[in-house]
Amino acid sequence: MLIQNFAVVISKYYASRCITLIESILKYDVKIYVLCFDKKTLQIINKSINSKKVTAIHFNKVLNFDRSLKVAIKDRKLIDKIVTSRPIFLKLLFKKFKLRDIFLLDSDIFFFSNPVKINKYIKGAAVAFCKHNFSRNNNKLSKKYGKYNGGFIYVKSNINGFDFLNKWSLLCKKWCQFDSINGKFSDQKYLEDLSTSVKNVKILNKPEINLAPWNLEGKIIKFNEENITVNKKKLIFFHFHGLRQISKRFFILGIENYGFTITNKIKKILFYEYVKSLSEKNITREYFWTKNNLFSKLLKVNLLFKKITKNDYLILMK
């Protein structure tokens, strides 16, 4: 039996998404390692998921594994600390659990079919990740955010895989900010140079892998019995980047961010199951109305109005 290993790094604000991700693949032959940035997050994962397939690890383990990380992230925002720690977390997992390989995932991914199908595309690779393939303004957005997406990265336990992690972790510790500055963006834009400086890197360009709001336009999405297909290929996973939970039943989808309008049919096929699962989880969320000052609220009211007029929302009915 071939076990697929997955890793996710989260704070308490992304716990509900992480649990939804885990639930989508738990029925398959998998092991999932979750790096939790605080004690509360660790408790949420352990309480919500009762399975030997899931191992929750406190962030202190990573800090003890790489002492230089604590200094590197000292003055960084939480999101920057999270992304900085990702390659180091993988290094820890390889050493501690003697893994053959691992997939690093963003917490806002959801699997619609068996992830084992990905193996045929990464065969022979030491490292693999996906092209963004922005549906609109590809050159402009690629220049800002990078040609490749960091939400799904495969690394194999060999000399080239470790070379990738060593180089990536050094770059992230030196600079990692969730903003586009001086040709850099978070931990993601580093993938462009690493794709050529590291040997045996494979770039994935398959519509059924890492389908997302930024590359959804123009795709032929169909639902046939229990399967969702994209361009006649069975969808493996969707990346729900940009989705915001406004209240228990009201969600902003994030499609309009990339310049096009979603149909109600695609909403039902792709988004309904995911947001329903998020809505059912009564745990800490990243609330939309966190900032209480009037100016901030007015901006958010304007944003909501724009999203509603563009059909970029979903309301779950009781």
Image: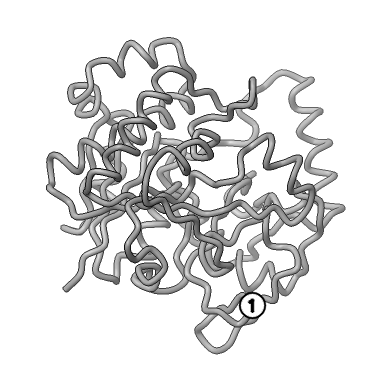
* Residue drawn at x 39%, y 20% as measured from the top left: 173
* Residue drawn at x 39%, y 16% as measured from the top left: 73
Q: How is the image coloured?
A: one colour
* Residue drawn at x 50%, y 84% as measured from the top left: 226
Residue placed under numbered mark 1 in the picture: 231
Pick the residue in front: 307 or 287: 307
Q: Is residue 195 above or below residue 291?
A: below
Q: Is residue 311 above or below residue 15?
A: below
Q: Is residue 282 above or below residue 117?
A: above
* Rendering coords of residue 69 (x, y %): 31, 19
Residue farthest bottom in this picture? 225
166 left or right of 217? left
On-image quarter of the N terminus: bottom left
Tell me if mark 1 has few (under 14), some (14-19) or many (20+) residues whose alpha carbon lies within 10 angstroms of its own: some
* Dot 1 amino acid type: Asn
* Residue drawn at x 62%, y 73% as measured from the top left: 269
On-image quarter of the C terminus: bottom right
300 left or right of 40? right
* Rendering coords of residue 250 (x, y %): 66, 52
SS at mark 1?
loop
Hey, which quadrant is residue 206 in on the image? bottom right
Pick the residue in front: 301 or 188: 188
260 left or right of 219? right
Q: Is residue 258 above or below residue 269?
A: above
The tally of labels here is 1
Hey, which quadrant is residue 135 in on the image? bottom right
* Rendering coords of residue 244 (x, y %): 62, 45
* Rendering coords of residue 7 (x, y %): 32, 48
Pick the residue in front: 51 or 169: 169
